[in-house]
Amino acid sequence: VFVDDKEAIICIPVTEKAWHVLYNAVTDNNWYSLDSNDAAFGVEGSYFSDKARSKKSLDNLARILAYLCDYWKIDHK
């Protein structure tokens, strides 16, 4: 999912594997106790030279992640 200040583009359905993390990404794999490609969402936020646009993009990104965690009953901590 790519997110900016105006929209979110879902390139690959969240029910499919996105291959968004390199294999053997030790830190990520330790966080999830699985390969990150199998256990984590791939969401990218956009940053702009305009600080207000960047803040809106970050807010949109947080809302999308919160929704996905809520939908699948995932503890975000």
Image: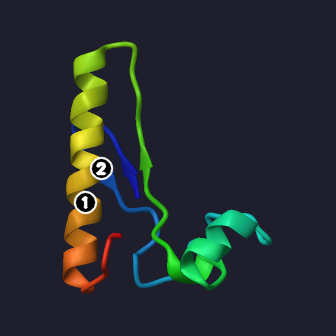
Residue drawn where x is 41% and y is 28% of the image: 47
- As measured in the structure, the alpha-carbon distance from the residue carrying label 2 to the one carrying label 1 is 5 Å
Could you tell me which residue is drawn at 55 percent across and 78 percent down?
Answer: 32
- Badge number at residue 43: none
Residue 34 in view of the camera: yes
Amino acid on which disc 2 is placed = Leu
| Residue that mark 1 sits on | 64
Which quarter of the image is occupied by the C terminus? bottom left
Mark 1: few, some, or many residues within 10 Å (few <14, many ≥20)? some
Give coordinates of residue 68: x percent, y percent.
27, 73
Residue 17 to residue 77: above or below: below
Label pair 2/1, CB-CB below 8 angstroms: yes
Residue 13 screen position, x and y as percent? 40, 75
Q: Nearer the viewer, residue 24 or 31?
A: 31
Q: Which residue is mark 2?
A: 61
Q: Is residue 33 above or below residue 10?
A: below
User: Toward which corner of the image does residue 11 lie, by quadrant?
Assistant: bottom left
Colour scheme shown: rainbow
Q: Secondary structure at mark 1?
A: helix
Residue 5 visible in this rendered orientation of the protein: no
How many neighbours does mark 2 have within 10 angstroms: few (below 14), some (14-19), or many (20 or more)?
many
* Residue pictured at 32% horizontal, 70% vertical: 76
Determine which quarter of the picture holds residue 43.
bottom left
Residue with the most extreme top position = 49
> Which amino acid type corresponds to the residue marked 1 in the rendered image?
Ile
Q: Quadrant of residue 9?
A: bottom left
Q: Position of residue 33 (x, y in %)?
A: 61, 84
Name the side, left or right, on which 18 lies relative to 56.
right
Per the image, label 2 sits on a secondary structure element best described as: helix
Image x and y of residue 10, in percent: 37, 62
